[in-house]
Image (spheres, rainbow, N blue to C red):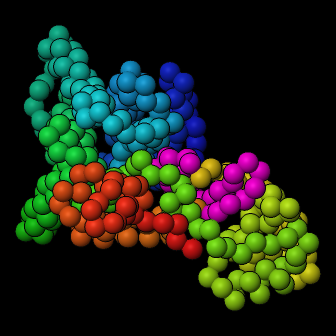
């Protein structure tokens, strides 16, 4: 949110405007002014765009308020030049809850379309789609057709649009979550390739942009689903690093540089009697060398604003928190003692190892296996399989 301006809140949900949105407003104003050489036409074009983004806010509120009914809070809604984003606390595990949350946004656009259509009927306005060419004269008709486009586009069965989530939710009624996501992602990427081919044949840059947007979105959604599948139900202790270098509060920046160059650690806990007092990250260490003497104590420059977790905490929840806070390392404490570090690199290694083990596991064990958890007694003496803490 550092690059976004809060413009209000609805039902306790903060609504933010990303700074790049101002570039869109300026570009739209310039486009209409250059086309018409009229200040009035430029202002009318901007008015239409602002009305569209009010509809986008209502669309995102449709998601957020539907999610609230299912007990899923929404952190914020942010407006970008390409649309809006409602940041939900989590994706519900029940497929039908995700279905209704996903459908909530396009349903708002359909409702807006119906209201505007009734208004046009009452006033005798035009329903012709070419009203979009003169938004200053046909604002209501233009806004109605734009809402039709928003509803249809968002219902395309491709991530990251709502239709991709609707498709995944329906598939998840018969498949596991990861498989349903992969199938929906494949459909989305196939559509992206189709959009790209059409864009190349028609020399349409907008279709090419949409194709890239959909393809990358489907790829990211598939990756997130894989992370969720392999981290859900796994405790932090299975992925935490147990061999790492620590620094004392009296150690100097020179000592920290020696440790950085001598090993593979990037972040160093600053401890006293086993208790973590700070976290010296590599970026901070390099910056401190520019601002302080090499003999400066690391305790004076270490990061004090970090969060910790426990060995038994759910890995998927901690991993999500790390991603949201752009945090690469989290100290793991038991009581007041530091017992490990959880890093994004190690989580990735756990997923790769677990995926490899799962792909080679006997078929009868695949349904029972979770990363790092026992699969029961076997006559051949192998008691469990999974990923231990990687040093």
- At x 17% / y 60%, what residue is drawn? 363
Q: Would you place residue 23 above or below residue 248 in this image?
A: above
Horizontal relation, residue 252 to residue 106: left or right: right
Q: Is residue 314 magenta?
A: yes
Q: Is residue 144 magenta?
A: no
Say if residue 140 shows up in the picture.
no
In terms of depth relative to the viewer, which is nearer, 241 or 221? 241
- At x 27% / y 62%, what residue is drawn? 379
Horizontal relation, residue 366 to residue 56: left or right: left
Q: Would you place residue 180 above or below residue 170 in this image?
A: below
Say if residue 334 shows up in the picture.
yes
What is the quadrant of the C terminus in the image? Answer: bottom right
The magenta stretch is 312-341
| Residue 77: percent from left, percent from top | 46, 37
| Residue 25: percent from left, percent from top | 43, 47
- At x 88% / y 83%, what residue is drawn? 294
| Residue 163: percent from left, percent from top | 20, 41
In terms of depth relative to the viewer, which is nearer, 326 or 129? 326
| Residue 134: percent from left, percent from top | 22, 38
Horizontal relation, residue 304 to residue 19: left or right: right
């Amino acid at each position: 949110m550092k690059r976004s301006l809060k413009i209000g809140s609805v039902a306790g949900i903060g609504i933010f405007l990303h700074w790049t949105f101002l570039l869109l407003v300026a570009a739209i104003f310039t486009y209409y002014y250059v086309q018409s050489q009229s200040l009035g036409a430029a202002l009318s074009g901007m008015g239409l765009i602002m009305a569209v983004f009010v509809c986008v806010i209502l669309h995102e509120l449709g998601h957020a308020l539907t999610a609230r009914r299912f007990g899923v809070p929404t952190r914020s809604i942010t407006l970008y030049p390409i649309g809006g984003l409602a940041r939900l606390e989590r994706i519900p595990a029940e497929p039908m809850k995700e279905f209704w949350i996903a459908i909530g946004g396009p349903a708002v656009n359909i409702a807006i379309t119906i209201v505007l259509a009734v208004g046009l009927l009452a006033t005798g306005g035009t329903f012709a789609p070419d009203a979009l060419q003169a938004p200053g004269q046909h604002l209501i008709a233009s806004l109605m057709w734009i809402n039709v486009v928003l509803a249809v586009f968002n219902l395309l069965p491709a991530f990251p649009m709502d239709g991709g989530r609707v498709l995944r939710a329906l598939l998840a009624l018969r498949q596991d979550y990861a498989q349903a996501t992969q199938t929906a992602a494949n459909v989305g990427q196939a559509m992206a390739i189709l959009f790209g081919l059409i864009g190349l044949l028609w020399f349409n840059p907008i279709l090419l942009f949409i194709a890239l947007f959909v393809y990358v979105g489907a790829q990211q959604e598939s990756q997130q689903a894989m992370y969720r599948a392999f981290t859900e139900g796994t405790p932090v202790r299975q992925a935490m690093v147990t061999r790492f270098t620590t620094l004392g509060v009296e150690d100097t920046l020179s000592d920290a540089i020696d440790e950085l160059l001598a090993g593979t650690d990037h972040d160093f806990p600053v401890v006293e009697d086993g208790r973590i007092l700070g976290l010296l990250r590599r970026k901070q260490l390099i910056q401190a060398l520019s601002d302080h003497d090499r003999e400066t104590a690391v305790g004076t420059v270490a990061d004090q604003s970090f969060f910790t977790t426990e060995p038994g905490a759910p890995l998927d929840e901690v991993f999500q928190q790390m991603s949201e806070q752009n945090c690469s390392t989290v100290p793991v404490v038991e009581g007041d003692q530091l017992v490990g570090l959880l890093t994004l690199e190690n989580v990735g290694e756990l997923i790769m190892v677990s995926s490899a083990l799962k792909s080679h596991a006997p078929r009868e064990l695949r349904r029972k296996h979770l990363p790092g958890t026992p699969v029961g007694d076997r006559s051949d003496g192998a008691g469990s399989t999974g990923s231990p803490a990687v040093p």
